[in-house]
Image (cartoon, rainbow, N blue to C red):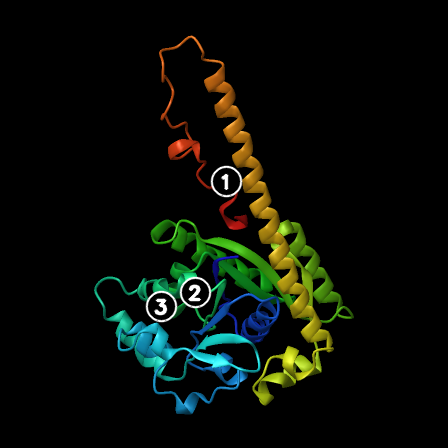
Amino acid sequence: MKRVIAIANQKGGVGKTTTAVNLAASLAATQRRVLLVDLDPQGNATMGSGIDKAQLTRGACEVLLGEADLASALVQVSEGGFTLLPANQDLTAAEVRLLTLPIGRETKLRHALQPKREAFDVILIDCPPALNILTVNALVAADSVLIPMQCEYYALEGLSALLDTVDQIREAANPELSVEGVLRTMFDPRNNLANEVSAQLVTHFGEKVFRTIIPRNIRLAEAPSFGRPALFHDKESRGALAYLALAGEMIRREDEAFAARAHEAVAQDSAFAAAVAGDGSGEEGEGVGEEEEGQGPAGEPHQAHATGEDRSR
């Protein structure tokens, strides 16, 4: 599961940072090596991981501006089991300075993360609640975007705006960017509107909507004030169990996608072998070393790219 996942929603108060911190801890609990990047100047993911943002000497700001390398800015989260690139209000200054750069301002984070990509199984990026240059950096660096959202009025409109941005990033800078999934957060099944919006989400986005639903939960809400994920605050709470379930669902999805790619590769190899075997009357060596469309050198298939609606990739 080697992936960089941006957790983004331009609307605040939808459980974005809660998802970033608790998903990081839950994936780490499955023995994945996890890096959480706090890209929000508010530094809530940093504080929620038990790190005092006021005491930072280097963090996401310095890394983005090239004033510190990534390795020197990372900290280990003891009550969480993951690694953190912390942040504080200095990121606001970094945002302003990035906007003055004539070229390359959208790719700063991607280049900064590159040396450490193989050191982690999953890199999660907690984006600010705005579609600004920091969020653009996250989307350019990411393989996919996970969208947490409350099932409330105007939720679908906000989701549409974010998906428009994802489309623009695909066209301009990151053609492989996909939607990891839409996560329903702070869900109260007693709320009729929440149930209606939830049903609309499933209708419009189908399998891209995670089956796991994050409930409203007191333990989940109070855990950041103790500087730790819910899993380390109350591991039996509904909130902690929900994020463990989300981690499991993401891992199963990845395993299923890998199995599907492997099956397609076997099918392509079989078709290629059959075509070569059926061409026994040709010159010696004819067809050897030739690449069919969709195959790489030595008959190895390229990874299949998703087709269909851009917004459900």
Q: Nearer the viewer, mark 2 or mark 1?
A: 2
Residue 110 placement: quadrant = bottom left
Q: State the residue at coordinates (40%, 51%).
A: 170
Q: Earlier in the sequence, mark 2 or mark 1?
A: 2
Q: Is residue 152 visible?
A: no
What's under tag 3, amino acid-wise?
Ile
- Inspect the image, locate mark 1, and give the three-letter code of the amino acid beneath it: Thr
Secondary element at image label 1: loop
Q: Residue furthest front?
A: 284
Which residue is located at x 53 percent, y 27 percent? 270
Residue 33 x/y as whole percent: 51, 67
**Closer to the camera in the image, 187 or 91:** 91
Instruction: Tell me: 187 left or right of 289.
Output: right
Q: On the image, numbered disc 2 is attached to which residue?
A: 119
Residue 131 at x, y = what percent?
42, 67
Which residue bears the numbered disc 3?
133
Q: Amino acid at mark 2?
A: Ala
Name which of mark 3 and mark 1 comes first in the sequence: 3
The answer to whether the residue labelled 3 contacts the one labelled 2, judged by CB atoms less than 8 Å apart, is no
